Image (cartoon, helix red, strand yellow):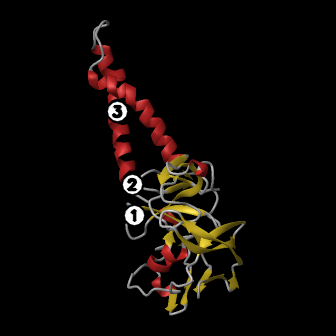
Amino acid sequence: MGEAVNFAVILFVLLVVTGLAWFADRLVFRKRRPADGGEPWWVEYGASFFPVILVVFLLRSFVIEPFKIPSGSMIPTLLVGDFIFVNKFTWGIRLPIVNTKIIEMNEPKRGDVMVFRYPENPSLDYIKRVVGLPGDTIEYINKHLLINGKEIPHRRVQDYLHRERLYFSPQYVEQLGEKDHAILVEDDSPAFVPHSSQFPFKDNCHYNSDGLRCQVPKGHFFVMGDNRDASSDSRVWGFVPEHNIVGRAFLIWFNFSDLKRVGGFS
């Protein structure tokens, strides 16, 4: 989804610099200035920006963070150009930048849409749907999803029209977790495309021409995109460690191309 980690570091540096200027003036330099003397430019800017940066940093780190959807891997749930909000505290409070959890709260559930740091490059944020929890056995065989030996119910609905390229995809409603969600499955795409990606716990997965079977290790999650045949996910690069979790996506707050999408998603 983007290099959010770099932005977090930049925001933290700005917070420290403006904060030091603000506190230094109030504790040291203000006492030395003449009563009728004006504030130097660095104090004026520090005093102006520090409270704003502090509020943004706290909100973004512990409460809610905005993201923009750059790819089509979560179509039809999320479209390219959707601006979404991500809840940063529902799955525990984490320290910014290092992403270490300091307060335990809820755990991700099957069907939740998760933003996480991409395991192969943690500077990138990805978004996918949680399919497998720690200890689950996940099978994706001939485009049918099974969890712990039970096939996940799904039903065919009206085909989905891709408005940008004007073509249709077969659309299904899948019952994963407490809520239903739509997925796209292309009839003419192979069930599984061989790859050479190496990842931790790859021995937990077994592949063949029909699909794969994976045992989700402790402290990890198996995720997939709703656009099943156009998503690089746990089927390709493996499991998401709990440490990589950023938060739960829940709301579309803007889309320049389609204002009707504002307020959607859950």
Measure the C-alpha gap from mark 3 to mark 1.
Answer: 28 Å
- Of labels 2 and 3, earlier in sequence is 2
Q: Position of residue 104 (x, y in %)?
A: 60, 57
Mark whose residue sits in front, 2 or 3: 2
The label shown at residue 122 is 1
From what the image shows, is residue 96 above or below residue 158?
above
Q: Is residue 237 left or right of residue 30?
A: right
From what the image shows, is residue 53 above or below residue 162?
above
What kind of residue is marked 1? Pro
The label shown at residue 18 is 3
Point 35% across, 53% down: residue: 6
Q: Which residue is mark 2?
A: 5
Q: Position of residue 254 (x, y in %)?
A: 54, 47
Q: Are marks 2 and 1 in contact (CB under 8 Å)?
A: yes
* Residue at disc 2, secondary structure: helix
What kind of residue is marked 2? Val
Please, which residue is most extreme toward the front here? 166
One can see residue 110 in this view: no
What kind of residue is marked 3? Thr
Quarter that holds the C terminus: bottom right
Q: Position of residue 76 (x, y in %)?
A: 58, 65
Q: Position of residue 117 (x, y in %)?
A: 45, 63
Point 68% across, 86% down: residue: 149
- Of labels 3 and 1, earlier in sequence is 3
Measure the C-alpha gap from mark 2 to mark 3.
Answer: 20 Å
Q: 161 or 41: nearer the eye?
A: 161
Label 1 environment density (alpha carbons within 10 Å; few <14, some 14–19, many ≥20): some
Label 3 environment density (alpha carbons within 10 Å; few <14, some 14–19, many ≥20): many
Measure the C-alpha gap from mark 2 to mark 1.
Answer: 8 Å
